[in-house]
Image (cartoon, helix red, strand yellow):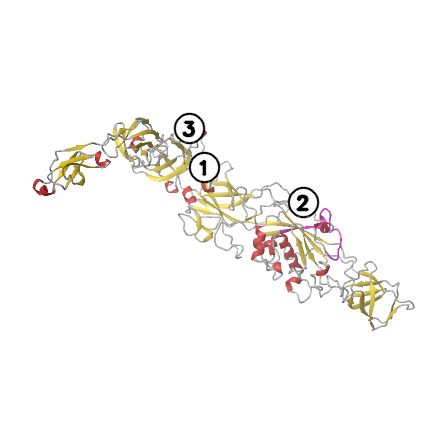
Amino acid sequence: MRVFPDDDVPFENVNRQTIRVKASINAPVADKMVYFRNFDMDDPSAHSEVDPDTLGNDNNGSVPGGTGTGRLSSTLRACRALANGIVRCSTNSEGVAIVDFTVTMQPGDNFAIAASTSETEINSVGFKPDDGLHLTSASRQPPLVINSECAPSEKVCRSRLLTVWRRVHIETDAMPSVSGNFIQAKIVPLPPGQQGIRILPGETKQLLVYDPSDPGGFPDDQFENGLLVLGIHKLPISSSTFGSVTVTNNGIQEVFMDNRSKLFLYDDDDFSNNDGANLTGDNGEAIPLPDVFLLPEGSAGDVRTSNVLALAYIRPVYYNANTLGTGFAQQFKANIDDFGQANLNSIIAFDNAGTNQDEKFWTIYLLNAYQARTDRDWDPRDEVPDEDDLPNVGETVPGLASFVFVETGGPKECTRQQPTFMCNISIITAREVARSLGAQPGDEGLLDLQSNVLSSTSLRKIREQTVP
Amino acid sequence: MIWGRDSGYGSAAIHIYDNAYQLVASVPVNFGGATWTSVSLNQYYAGRIKRIILVRPTVFNELYGHIFVDNFQFTPITTVSPIGNLDSVSIQNAAAVGWSVDPDTPSASNVVHCYINGTFAGATPANLPSPDVPHPGNHRFSFPIPLQYRDGVQHSISCYGLDVTGGDPNFLLTGSPKTFKFNPPIGYQGDFIQDGVATGWSLDPDVPLQSDRVHFYVNGPSGGGGTLIGDIWANIPRPDVNQVTGYPGNHGYEFSIPAQYRDNQPHTLYAYGIDLTGDVNKVLLASPKTFNLSPSNVTSVSFEEIAPPKLQHPNR
């Protein structure tokens, strides 16, 4: 049995933290007294850092003014609070006693309720020694049966395990279609008397070029394996340096250029790896919404082998940004060089930002972007992508947004030397969502792109955080 | 101080006997012939001397050592009786308290004897710290009132300070006598409000702000074949009890009959108020009550959401 105590919609003002507990006696008789007692059961997790022992009382959350054991309520008409948190309620004409129980808000917290017609017996209920998953009582040293049905001879009956689950509402977004991902260059003015440069079929030649809009030049190797386009001619670039490119004319016609020629330089960006030799810098190509294959919603979200977050008792719920208020991200940027909030605010369009700090309605903004910082987008390839141990295939600014860089982490750019997990967009996506939920690089496992599952450290952090 | 003269023997001893003719000291003396010689006796002996005997060793066997001296003078030191006061009888502590001291031995603690209704009730040392008593040493006492006098009836107590050395009369402490009355619990055993839940109230009038305990016996009274089946605090608010008795505090109780007595058989339930100060416990008014309960056990515990359905995300 599980409970989702969070709001169904933002600021819902509905108490979903409290559920009803019903205890039936063996005859439909009214005014029989039933004693209820709640327990914080041991976390069944096999992860050492999440649950290092076999004892109970290990929930992460607490109810207002109470503890991690939750709280039974005596506010119902036929109930009265007794010592030790016990609440006594009388049965109705159907022989059913009813009490309300308030759970904590942290995912994975779990509880059990014991009920008995004997106050003495309910007071004797406790954990089995060194076994916080089971309860015993004075009349029953073998653990109480974990079943919603109990034999009439049993003096105490316990409920099944009740576990808190949470939902994280993920707003998925993508940058607009790629645009402007090229340089319009010219050759360095020729000396007087030289009319132009000719490149014969099969000839390789180094050209001195510059970007009129950026006289500062471009980095070495930026256009290596790229393409120079001049009119109908497309010349592969074998190497590039600051202010020059070396091209080969693979065509059958001579290529001529002069001071007036407009040269379009494309690097080898091709996030979907579908351009072949016809490189265009992905210009005009739409960036897809995030790949959430490892974070399915609906019933698939309950399956631990399907939903990375299921081990943390969290189910995703998705919102397509295009169907919300302001729609998609505001602008395409080939690289995000500045992760300051001011710069990001000019890019992202977080429609659910209003609930970003709501502890009862967890929201995350997940954006498919193009490339990371220009010095860490693996383009040119001799960049050191992991200079600070953070794979730059994704980035997260806690409390603001998570980014997946589809080109940097894509099949073409992400080199074969990198670990397999680092070059899998769905894994990168799951990792960035986990970061928004409190996990951090250095946790090992998914967060260090060593595997596709969350480490014990990450699970603990996610289950302890109160608002992503 | 003893003066003696005996020309016949230089070496002898003075034996000193107390009021009960018990030898309390043997002091070597040498009266040295016809000259008057003095022997100093300490204060302890002075207060208890009944007889002084000169013993001459050479004739000890012949006369069993008892030869009276003709010439001696004995000047006893002046002593006084103890003093002290019986301050009060503390209901809270169930004890008579006060102080007593023998000024002859102000550093020593003396003994206090107390009489209730003229009958000796017990003794206690006056050896508790007494910073308020202008004598060195510890001189306060706390005499526990015996249980038989904590019975809701008024009694009178007087206490005496005993002389340390025994030479002076005992002293009836000022403040004596004091009257006192200890109140046992009062209460009422009400009806069963619901299945197997006995109700009622109990309080100790001596300390009404505190809640007392109630003991429950089944099938007989305490000490009369009954079995103790419950011991609970009477601490549930009962404004009606406060109003009727005039006592403050929370004094109601609710007691659930244990499962083994829910057996379709008739039983009697006795309820006793337990005194907070150790007075006698009292069976509550209207006790005992009879009951005949059928057994019942919980056969299922289940959960049910009570919040409105998740309309926005019904399957999430």
Q: Which chain carries label 1?
A: A
Q: Give the image location of residue B241, x and y in percent.
A: 42, 29
Q: How far apart are marks 2 and 3 (CA)?
A: 57 Å
Same chain letter for marks 1 and 2? yes
Up-down relation of residue A157 to residue B89 (above or below):
below
Question: What is the quadrant of residue B151 in the picture?
Answer: top left
Asked if the magenta segment contains residue A320, the reply would be yes
- Our reading of the magenta stretch's main secondary structure is loop
Which circle, 1 or 2, is nearer the viewer? 2
* Residue situated furthest left in the rendering: B62
Q: Can residue B182 be seen in this view?
A: no
| Amino acid under disc 1 | Asp
- Numbered tag placed on residue A31 in the rendering: 1
Q: Are marks 2 and 3 in contact (CB under 8 Å)?
A: no
Q: Give the image location of residue B29, x and y in percent.
A: 17, 40
**Residue pointed to by mark 2:** A354
* Highlighted range, magenta: A316-335
Q: Give the image location of residue A196, x and y in percent.
A: 89, 68
For numbered disc 2, what is the local secondary structure? helix
Q: Give the image location of residue B75, x and y in percent.
A: 20, 31
**Residue pointed to by mark 3:** B247
Which circle, 2 or 3, is nearer the viewer? 3
Q: Is residue A197 visible?
A: yes
Q: How far apart are marks 1 and 2 (CA)?
A: 49 Å
Same chain letter for marks 1 and 3? no
Question: What is the quadrant of residue A256 in the picture?
Answer: bottom right
| Amino acid under disc 2 | Gly
Q: Which chain carries label 2?
A: A
Query: Going by the image, does A411 lie left or right of B81?
Result: right
| Amino acid under disc 3 | Tyr
